[in-house]
Amino acid sequence: MAFFQILTIVAFILVAKPSTSSSACENSTISTNFSQTKINYRETSNRSKTSTESFKNYIKTSCNSTTYPSICYSSLSPYAAKIEADPTKLCSVSLSLAYKAAKSASTTISKILKKNNMTGIAEQVVQDCFGNVKDSIGELKDSLDSLGHLDGADRKFQINNIKTWVSASITDDQTCSDGFDEMNVDSTFTEKIRNLVLDVARKTSNALYFINNNLY
């Protein structure tokens, strides 16, 4: 009877051991898979960082040739992943930022006109400037629309239109600034308007540079 009990215990141990070994193997597999996942994530993250830095270098190099390189890089570098190293995307994003700046300036000027009780020359100059900026917005929008449809047979014609509209936008911004100088209008709110319009003009100027040198 005792011998039979011993055999039973040995048999139980032999049966139990493979189960323990299998569990350890499974745990080892899970651990290995998790480690591999971490490695893959790290490699993907490193590649992404390397690509982003490469794209930023492309933007910096491109901006160095513009009239306002500092403004160019500071405004475009956050969009490095979107621009990549694509000249057309560089044109599109820089033009979009000029358009966004123009709309922001228009909104601010409109609020100033409503809140400040301006009269006479000051009011007229600001109203004229507001009109100039609105024209600038329209020209930049037309440019963006055409930039998104350059695959047709009239590509060269569209590019020429874009250049004309963007140039006209810069002229409108300059006309606004000239109005303040010619009429000798000077105050806190007009200085704010000057700075906003100047920002639009500089971003538009940089966009025009890219368009002139990257679209064919």
Image: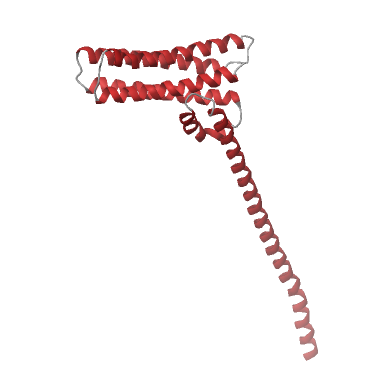
In this picture the colour scheme is secondary structure
Query: Can see residue 138?
Result: no
Left or right of 90? Residue 174 is left
Judge by depth and name the residue closer to the eye, 103 or 168: 168
Q: Quadrant of residue 5?
A: bottom right
Image point (48%, 15%), residue name: 166
Image point (70%, 63%), residue name: 28
Q: How many marks?
A: 0
Residue 6, compared with residue 132, is above or below; it is below
Judge by depth and name the residue closer to the eye, 16 or 172: 172
> Residue 121, percent across and down?
22, 12
Image point (58%, 16%), residue name: 149
Left or right of 190? Residue 53 is right
Query: Can see residue 128?
Result: yes
Left or right of 194? Residue 92 is right
> Residue 32, percent across and down?
69, 59
Image point (45%, 30%), residue name: 71
Residue 27, compared with residue 59, is above or below; it is below
Judge by depth and name the residue closer to the eye, 1 or 140: 140
Quarter of the image where the N terminus is located: bottom right
> Residue 37, percent across and down?
65, 52
Quarter of the image where the C terminus is located: top right
Residue 78, compared with residue 216, is above or below; it is below
